[in-house]
Amino acid sequence: EIVLTQSPATLSLSPGERATLSCRASQSVTNSLAWYQQKPGQAPRLLIYDASTRATGIPARFSGSGSGTDFTLTISSLEPEDVAVYYCQQRYYWPPLTFGGGTKVEIK
Amino acid sequence: QVHLVESGAGVVRPGSTLRLSCAASGFNFSSFSMHWVRQGPGKGLEWLAVISHDDGKKYYADSVRGRFTVSRDNSKSTLYLQMNSLRPDDTAVYYCVRHLPSGNYYFDFWGQGTLVTVSS
């Protein structure tokens, strides 16, 4: 099973700041990684897939990068509506498909 | 537009059974594999199972293999999860999920989730 480790657990930033979230895989997943956003009381929403491709309707301030074992989700300028928990997910080696433990993004 | 609506929520005793349903609309259900994902209270996401578009192949997470069974009825555009021998750690919101049309297992549409509580 591929384990995904996300860091930090919590990120507290001011509006307009840059947010950098990390996801590290226990072995290479090539570029087979996605990022999701989950707001309180809602289902997750797909943001990024194949490490760097934005899903339909996702604002340009969200970007993904990385390959192999190290991946990054960047929010270029944090908006109040970006408060959420962010999860990474790999599809390279399954079953099982696996998710990271999440990073909570807060507004200062 | 794509809609996935789960049902079958409930509070059950340990050892009980429960069946969840997911009614799909807005897309060609019979062309997509479908998944179940759950989220325990205050916890992260856990993939549980996938069933191929034609019901031919099924795969499970170790935590539910042998206890849960995924099935589908393409004539009704409905996905099911039969849950047996339920345990307190199965308490979670259960999501029915569709993957991208490309066939890659990234999840572009999620149901609203249905809460299963296992407690004595």
Image (cartoon, coloured by chain):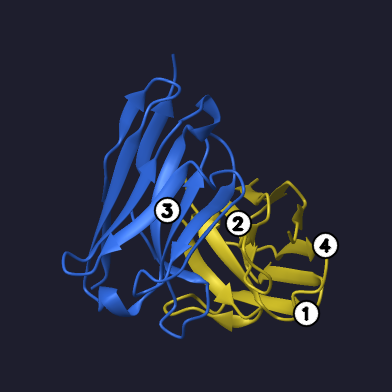
Chain colours: A yellow, B blue
How many neighbours does mark 2 have within 10 angstroms: few (below 14), some (14-19), or many (20 or more)?
many
**In the drawing, what numbered circle is on residue A59?**
none
Secondary structure of the residue carrying tag 3 is loop
* Helix, strand or loop for disc 4: loop
- For label 3, the residue is A43
Q: Amino acid at mark 4?
A: Ser
Q: Can you tell which quarter of the image residue A57 is in?
A: bottom left
N-term-proximal mark, 3 vs 4: 4
Q: CA distance from mark 4 to mark 1?
A: 13 Å
Judge if badges 2 and 1 mark residues of a common chain: yes
Depth order, front residue of A33/A75: A33
Can residue B46 be seen? yes
The reply to whether callout 2 and callout 3 are in contact (CB within 8 Å) is no
**Residue B8 placement, left or right of B104:** left
The numbered dot on residue A67 is 1
- Judge left or right: residue A12 versus residue A55: right
- Determine the secondary structure under disc 1: strand
Q: Which residue is mark 2?
A: A86
Instruction: Tell me the residue at 58%/77% (across/down).
Output: A49
- Report the amino acid beneath label 2: Tyr
Task: Return the residue found at the far top.
Answer: B120
Kindly report the distance in space between the C-alpha atoms of the residues bearing marks 2 and 1. Answer: 18 Å
